[in-house]
Each structure stands twice: as C-alpha cells, then as structure tokens.
Image (cartoon, helix red, strand yellow):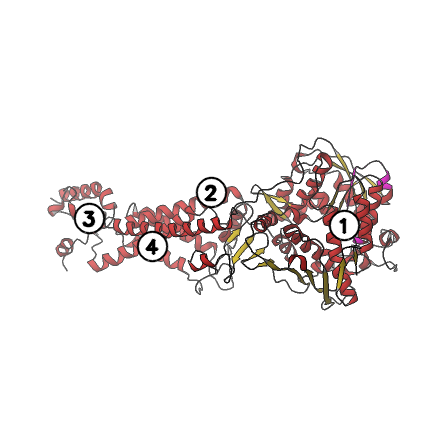
Amino acid sequence: MSERTAAERTLTSPRYSNFQLTALVILRMLVGWHFFYEGLSKLVSPYWTSAGFLSESKWLFSKLFLWVAANPTPLVMVDFINKWGLLLIGLGLLLGCLTRAATYGGIALLFLYYIAAPPFAGYAYAMPAEGSYLIVNKVLIELAALLVLLAFPTGKIIGLDRLIFWKRETGKLARLAEAAR
Amino acid sequence: MSNDEQHASGGSEPQVGGSNEGRGIGRRDLIKALASIPIFGVFFLSFFQKKASDDFKRREIMAELGVPEGAPAFIPEAISRPPSELVRVGIIGFGGEGESLVRHAGYAHPDWVEDSREAARKDPRNKSLETYLSQEDLNIAITAVCDVFDVRAERGLAASQVELPSGGGPRRQQAKRYLRYTDLLESGDVDAVIIATPDHWHSRMTIDAVDAGKHVYCEKCMTRTEDEAHAMYEAVKNSNIVFQLGHQNRQAESHIKAREIIAANILGPTTLVETTTNRNDPWGAWVWDIHEEGNPKTIDWDQFEGPAANKVPFSLERFFRWRCWFDYGTGLAGDLLSHEYDAVNQILEIGIPKTAVASGGIYFFKDGRDVPDVFQAVFEYPDRDLTLVYSATLANGKWRGKLFMGHDATMEIGAGLTIRAEGSSTRYEKKIEDGIIDTSLPLFTYRPGFKGIDAVTSATEEYFASRGLLYTYRGGRRVSSYHLHIKEWLDVIRSGGQTSCNIERGFEEAITCHMATRSYQLGRKVEWDAVNRKIV
C-alpha cells in the first residue's frame, strides 16, 4: 500500500453507510449514557464507595484490590478516579468529544472491573447479579462494544470531535490534495 | 453506493479533494457535531426528575422520622480529661479474655504483636495491629498479675512490660506476680483490678476488692448465682469504688444510634424483641485449647475451684473449657445471652423481666458438658407490653440480627442498623399510600465507620464483628469497643461520673440470666418478685 493510499484511508475512512453510522453512533451513545450515569450517581451519593466491590475481589489480582479496599488513602483515590473517570468517559462518548481517549479510558476501567471479579467457574460472589454469567459477563460485553467503537470511530462524524479536529483534518486533506497535484 | 453518494448523504468525514478542501465549518457540520446534545438534554431531564423525586421522598421520610442519618451524637458517661494521674491496675485471670482486656488497655503481649504483624502481611485487610497502635495511651501501669496457671501468669508478666505500647505510651517495669488474688489486693501495688476469671469467682473477688478499696472492672456474666448477685450488688452499692461490667457493646455506635431511634418512636409500639446466638465451630462452643504445659503442677486446682458448687478431682477439660460446666458458669445464659440482654437493656432500658421460661438441651456437643448447647429463653415484660425472646444454638452459624418489632416498623441491628416500615403501619399509612415510603426498601439505614472493610478471620470473629462486640467507630475512626469500655471506667475513676454498665445494670443482667438458667434447670416458668427482690 502506498503512503498516500494509507494516509487517505486513515483520513477518509470510515466510509459508513447511513445505517452503519446510525448503528455505531447509537452504540456509542448507549455506552456513553451508561458510563455517565454510573459516574454521576456515584458522585451524588454521599455513601458510595468501591470498597464493597473491591473486597469481593477474586482471582490473580485480588490481593491488590483487597489492599485498596482495606486502606483509606488508596481507597479514597480509587473512588475519586473511578467516579470522575466514569463521568468524563461517559461525557466523551455521549458528546463525541475526545472520543478516542474516552474509548481507551473506558476499556481500561472495564478491564479492571473484569479482572477484579471475573465470573470464572468456581468463583461465587456475594454481590447479587441480575443474570447468570460464566466467563462472559456484561462488563466484558461492554468492553467488546468499546473495542468495536475503537475500530469504527464515529466521533469526528457525529460529535464535537468534528469541530475539535476540523482544522487538523481539513489541513491534512488540503496538504494531501496539494501533494496529489 | 459510490463514495460521492456516501459523502452527499452525510456519512463521512471531510473528504480529499473537491469542495471540502480547506473550507470553513458549515451549518451541516455544526448539526453533525452537536447531534448528541438533544440526547444529553434527555439525560439531564430524566436525571433531575429522578433525583428530585428521590430527594423529595428522602426529605419527607427524614422529616417524618426526625432522626439524622449520620453518626449518633455520642454523649460520654464520664468527662474524659487527659489521663494525668497514673492508675496502677492489677489483672486477676490472664486467660484469653484477660489478655485481650489488657491488650485493649495498651499492653500487648509480644507474641500477639508478632502474630498480628504476620496476619496483616498475609491479609492486608487485617487491621488488628494498626487499631491497637492507634489506641489512645490510657496512662495505666499493669503492676500486678494473678493467675492460677503458671504459663498464663508468665504471659501476663511479659505483657506488662509492653514492648510495643499503643498510643505512644512509655515502656513499663515488669509487673509482680501474686499467687493469691487476696495478696494482690493487699499488696498496695494496685489502685484498680480487672477481674477476668471464670464466673464463679466474680462475686467473691469483687467483694474482696471493694473491701480493699480497689476499683473493679469485672467480666460478664456478673455472677454465677442469684445469691452472689445480691451480695456483690450490696457490696458495690455501699462503697465508693468505680465498677464497670464487661459489656463492651455499651460502646457500639449502632446501639447508641438505636437509642435515638427508640427515643424518636420510629418503631411505634414495640411488642417483640428477638435476639440470637448462632455459632458453629468448636471454639465458639467453648471447646478451647488445652495447653500442653497444663498439669497439676502448673495449675493451682484448689484455687481454681474455690467457691465452685461441686469439688471434683483435677481436670484439664474443666480448667481450660470451664464454660461447659454449671460449676463455674452458666453456659449460654451467662456467656452470650448476657451480652444480648444487656444490648437490649441498653437500647430499651427494660430492666428485670416479670417472668422467664427457658428450654434447651445438649444436642450436638455431647462431650461431657452439663450446660445446654441449644438454648431458648422467653422473658415477659407486661408493664412494657413486651416480650423478649433469646434463641441460640452452637451448631449452626446462620446470622440473625437483633430484631425490634414495632407496629410501625422493624429495626434490625448488627454492626449497622436497618429499619423497614410495616405495611400495616398506622403512622406511615399515608406515606405508604402516597408512594413516599416503599415497604420493600429500608426506611433508614445506618452504616457505622469509615469506608472500608474490616477483616474477619474466623466465623466466631465475624459473629462478634456483626454484633459490634469487637470494633466500633468514633468520628469515623475504628476503635475497639473493649478499649472504649475500659477507658470509660478509667475516666470515671479519675474524673467522676457514671460507668455505662454500672452495678445497677449489672444486677439486672445477672438476675435476668439467672432467671433463664433457673427456669431451664427447674423445667418451669420462674418469676421475679420485685418486692422481696427474689426469683421465685
């Protein structure tokens, strides 16, 4: 693939059909809404803490999570990062603002939630679950949804990123067009 | 679909070439950029609707109840001043409980420090050592130790030097060992004593301590028999010493909160209180370790038996597992009903019941014990229109909180506290109808402590933790309830005031427990004759 075609592809693709674009944007909005509400509801609840979740931790990394749950200083930090992280990631996905960074952040948080309490055979959790899960749970599915959004970005099409990256994108295109002549 | 068509239909980013090149932001671009704003609007609209409705319900409920959801206003029984004056304390009985009390007073045995360090290293949730070190220095000296078992006496001496003091206190000289507690009382080395012997010694030791003018912190059950309770009450009542009975639940934040709930009459007429014990391990059934060095040479058996009802030949089982025999204690009644009763008495101030009926049996631990391992007692308080039920088994670990059942609401107390409205409540009828109170959700929850999880290392410890017997909180900081209970005793010794579990409360506790024991032994209902102050 020539350099030009590669650059063009990055800049011009994805070339989605309306249906594809609509489906992807809906997915982004739904995940964004979920993150945003999770963050906001934690922020407005004076009693919320991740300690209950963390103290249930099982598997390879449980020691670390348990340690956080048991120590006020790291716990306060983790709680802070978690609620503001959720809130900002949700905002990013909903508005299509710095979408790529928000998607990466979301994947990181979901990954941590997953490895803290993975639904592996033999692990039982006291936390009530609304469904039945084996290896795959909704955290993992939401993580996969974010991977899809990373592979098929939409922020620069429908979202504030269209304005944020406007100059850069159009400038690059102009330069490419110039070079093409 | 061709690229151009896609572009025309608004599907993609600015394109190479064509009219898009280097152009400004158009109207269509703005629409696309801000397309999610309406969704954002819907989000906030629904969020604020939900929040407004939740807040409204909450405000309505809190206004109705008139009790704040935060930590209880703690009104100390005694004025706590900086502990300027050193109190010299003697410990009589350095078994498990005695060692624990001394540690919570700031004197940890080096082995315990070592074990706790190891435990904290293995499980970061284990905070025993941290809690110990952050305890306030009570400015006491353990000057005298008395135990009939040499190994335990030696442990007491080792602890008294306090290698690692809590609260930045100084190290101390080693205590002196006394072979007889009477010598300890007469030595002039102590101002106050902690009595942590088996129950059959409590009364006589306390009376002797009163005669010697020493302040007393005595373990529960206050006495083994009704007669001993009367004698001990008279002695303490007619003296100037400060007496504290070892019901550390008096310091539990959730119990203090429960008093606020009762004062605000949130439960309505409360006709039934149910309190329980469920343990399911040998240790919890008093099958305690028999020390390998325990033998007739290292144990002063005659002194151990002392005022025991029946004298029997030397027995390691009886020495190390004394709670299993009526000769030295009263089994579940004195060990665990006493705590449960005192907690209810602390919250409701019910005093001595009118009648008691108890039953049970030795159904699981058929190991030669003569106290029941399954035990139920029902106490009637006709003046209060109230029944108190105690239900216990030592062969099932199901956790059952204390339940206070009122016409308007039910309160369940463990380490925290939950209140649920009754569907047929008179007081909350309107609010339930209006959908403000949802009877399927707690009306009120109170969670004590900081945002963290306590380590629970065994089933029995979990049992204690859930009942607020191990740790409680002051200002969000975790403190041992034992520590607070001893501190209160010392505060009263130094500055005056009242201990929360004084001789009046102790007498009520002892008589209530003995009514249950008597009923179990006689196989009939017993009554408290309030005029002649006698169980009949």
Which region of the structure is painted magenta? Answer: B183-199
Label 4 crowd (10 A; few <14 / some 14-19 / many >=20): many
Marks 4 and 3 belong to one chain = no
Q: Which quarter of the picture shows residue B520? A: bottom right
Is B198 one of the magenta-colored residues? yes
Label 1 crowd (10 A; few <14 / some 14-19 / many >=20): many
Find residue B95 and name its label.
Answer: 1
Which residue is tagged 3? B31
Marks 3 and 1, Cα distance to the nearest angstrom?
A: 78 Å
Marks 4 and 3, Cα distance to the nearest angstrom?
A: 22 Å
Instruction: Check the image and report above or below for B17 versus B316.
Output: above
- Local SS, label 3: helix
Q: Amino acid at mark 1?
A: Gly
| Residue A107 shows in this picture | no
Find residue A77 and name its label.
Answer: 2
Marks 4 and 1 belong to one chain = no
Residue B336 is situated, as x and y percent measured from the top left of the image, at 70, 56
C-beta proximity under 8 Å, tags 4 and 1: no
**Residue B385 located left or right of residue A95:** right
Q: Chain of mark 3?
A: B
**Residue B422 located left or right of residue A93:** right
Q: Considering the image in quadrants, where does the N terminus of chain B appear?
A: bottom left
Q: Chain of mark 2?
A: A
Marks 4 and 1, Cα distance to the nearest angstrom?
A: 59 Å
C-beta proximity under 8 Å, tags 3 and 2: no
Find residue A31 and name its label.
Answer: 4
Q: Chain of mark 4?
A: A
Marks 3 and 2, Cα distance to the nearest angstrom?
A: 39 Å
Q: Amino acid at mark 2?
A: Met
Marks 2 and 4, Cα distance to the nearest angstrom?
A: 24 Å
Marks 1 and 2, Cα distance to the nearest angstrom?
A: 42 Å
